[in-house]
Amino acid sequence: MLAPTGGAEQGRAGKRPLVSIRNLSKQFSNGTLALRDVDLDLYPGEFVSLLGPSGCGKSTLLRMLSDLSAPSAGTIDWPGAESGDAYGNPEHSLGFVFQEPTLMPWAVTLDNVTLPLRLKGMKKPEANERAAAMLELVGLKGFEGSYPRELSGGMKMRVSIARALVTEPKVLLMDEPFAALDEITRHKLNDDLLMLWQRNKFTAVFVTHSVFESVYLSERIVVMAARPGRVMSELMVDAPFPRDNLFRTSAEYAHLCRLGSDALKKAIDA
């Protein structure tokens, strides 16, 4: 079902969003207006893709969600946050997977994954145990002592995902993490990501410019237009989980991809 902006929120009447974004805009110091008047709610445990052309502000929106960048106008509220810090501000339980793995080249896989735990003050034995369990979950058991230079592109991205999830975040932000990978590896990582999402029940916000990837992964696709970036429409993907190659080759998948392509074209032409 293709819904206008706000349709998904109407379908969740009575449910409390985890994150509520209102009238969000971002203008850079050079005058570029990256985002304008973005309204978006994110709900606990859902998988949302931000789909749009380059320059539509998808990555900028993720950076503002993670407090790596400040809005020029508008608000990002966390009404669904379960706890607050010493100042009464809601705690943002976030993991972030960037376009590049951004691993420490001098550190082995296990040490790369334990980094956020050690920064939180966790003792090394416990951090190593949790990191090793997460590496096994992402299919990297036996590579704990390998350096990034010894890993393939897909394996390095798995390390990055393990590092983001080892703190058990409520929200996982992913900024086109599989864009540089070959199709076979990308499909495998899509499957593994859905397995981790269903297992850990985090809210996933996934940036992509691939209609096919967004339809395969998502419950909801937010279609964005560029210059300035803004939300144009939403596509609800009602296909059940788990998804597999049968879904990728189904008539339902092809139909949803056509709807996504049409929505993206309208956004680009807007």
Image (spheres, helix red, strand yellow):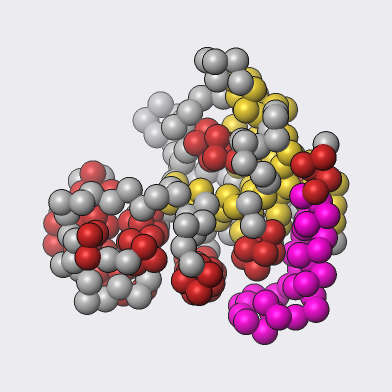
Q: Provide residue 209's location: percent of width, then percent of height.
A: 63, 52
**Residue at x-position 27% and y-position 66%:** 151
Q: Name the residue at 80% across, 78% down.
A: 251
The spot of residue 54 in percent (x, y) is 62, 41
Magenta span: predominant SS is helix
In this picture, residue 212 sits left or right of residue 172:
right
Relative height, residue 14 to residue 242 (above, below):
above
Question: Is 183 colored magenta in this rendering?
Answer: no
State whether residue 267 is above or below residue 216: above
Count the labels in the image: 0
Q: Is residue 2 visible?
A: yes
Locate the N terminus by quadrant. Answer: bottom right
Magenta segment range?
Answer: 235-264
Residue 259 within the segment the image draws in magenta: yes
Q: Position of residue 261 (x, y in %)?
A: 78, 57
Residue 224 lies, with reference to residue 44, above or below; the image says above
Any part of residue 22 in sight: no
Please tell me which residue is depicted at 67% across the width and 84% down the height of the picture. 246
From the viewer's side, name the closer residue of 250 and 47. 250
Q: Is residue 218 left or right of residue 81?
A: right
What quarter of the picture does the C terminus occupy? top right
Q: Quadrant of residue 46?
A: bottom right
Q: Nearer the viewer, residue 118 or 30?
A: 30
Residue found 33% across the figure and 48% down from its top: 102
